[in-house]
Amino acid sequence: MSQPSGPAQRSGVPLRLGIAGLGTVGIGVVKIVQRHADLLAARTGRPITITAITARDRTKNRDADLSGYAWVEDAVTLAQRPDVDIFIELMGGHEGAANASLRAAIASGKDVVTANKALLAHHGHALALMAEAAGQVIRFEAAVAGGIPVVKSLTEGLAGNGMRRVMGVMNGTCNYILTRMESAGLPYDQVFEEARQLGYLEADPNLDVGGIDAAHKLSLLAAIAFGTKVCFDKVELEGIGRISIDDIRRAGDMGYKIKLLGVAQMTGRGLEQRMTPCLVPMASPFGTLTGGTNMVVLEGDSVGQIVLRGPGAGEGPTASAVMSDVVEIARGTRLPTFGQPACTLVDPIPAKATAPAPYYLRLELLDKPGALAKVATVLGDEGISIDRMRQYGHENTSAPVLIVTHKTTRDAINHAINRLPSTNVVQDVPVAIRIEEV
């Protein structure tokens, strides 16, 4: 990519920031610039200053001194100001002001830093083409896994690797809910409401618990890792709403933890992307992950497996990631948005996961003679072999039964589940969760 001359490359000349969005992350960026002005100048060779800001509500108390910055009424106007070198978009949303202001910034010769994973998941390729044609850069470290430098790891540190697989627990709210359910023995609905009261959930909670937020992130990492256009709409997606406290306890009895786990890999059939609940071994890196912490595992053909772990959200961690992008631009580092020119990214062939894996099955069986034998017959007919089985105490006329299978396919599991009602011994819809080998 070409490296145009201009204010963003001149040593000693202040690098001027315009910030759109003054929520938790935006104020975190302001505090870093104010607190570490000397440190930032020493590390970049030039002062980094804020010249203008905007947000929905000018009167809100934001626990920061904003008096030295010009207030602009809308983000597009801010993006076009001549005294702004880097436009920092922290508003969120994939349409409206966020999309319009990013395009205005690029058209006005600005570099862009954003934490907006939804915008890039929906429009990333088009925006990258636009920016690279104009000689500008879009950087988005803060959009994926908060304070963990996973974008930089893929685009720079592991650039000499052919990537084999990307995996991650990338939504701290989901991980908080699952680990809180486990540690406190509380049902999903109660912990969900607790998370809402604590302010952990998005305004639309389904972005979190439905896995959408994490799937946005996975699609961005997959594009970098495998040289494809962002393909969010082909991510296999399932949230955590069906995970019960009984699942968590009984998975623990079998030696596993339940996580909302993203997995992306390129196979001979195409690009697999899935963000679904999975069982992972307790002793694995993901199995030890608690609270709102995020973890990303990267597997390259030369480096092997790299594990990155850290805070996935919050004022400090996410603002830290924003400033890492600002510092790189201040130093003159100019990379294509997704690690290689956008015009070279290919349309991925979406593929469902067909690689065999063990599965966890939870069934509610009626207390009838031969009930287990009927279930075993259905599984056997679909080529599913039982590795372990555990039956719990009767509840009225039924009993919960757990089965861990040997490696099988999701299609075989689905076929078996569809046939189980015909046995007349299974109550409710069985729960099937893939066991991921990590």
Image: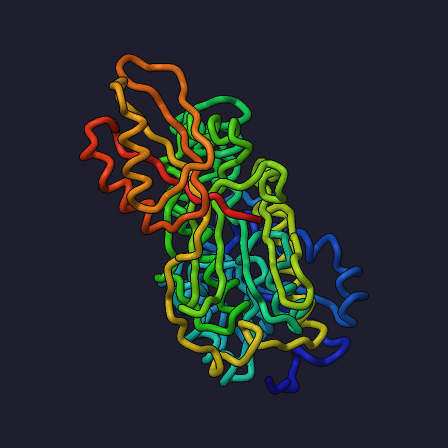
Q: Is residue 56 visible?
A: no
Residue 328 x/y as whole percent = 68, 69
The quarter holding residue 159 reads: bottom right
Q: Nearer the viewer, residue 115 or 344?
A: 344
Relative to 73, residue 410 above or below: above
Q: Is 360 on the left or on the right of 110, as rendered?
A: left
Which corner quadrant holds the N terminus? bottom right
Q: Nearer the viewer, residue 351 or 88?
A: 351
Q: Nearer the viewer, residue 313 or 53?
A: 313
Relative to 69, residue 111 above or below: below
Q: How many marks?
A: 0
Relative to 429, residue 150 above or below: below
Residue 341 x/y as whole percent = 53, 81
The residue that appears at 40% across and 22% down in the rendered structure is 391
Q: Is 345 on the left or on the right of 11, as rendered?
A: left
The residue that appears at 40% across and 41% down in the rendered structure is 385
The furthest residue to the top:
396
The residue that appears at 59% across and 61% down in the rendered structure is 141
The residue that appears at 60% across and 59% down in the rendered structure is 298
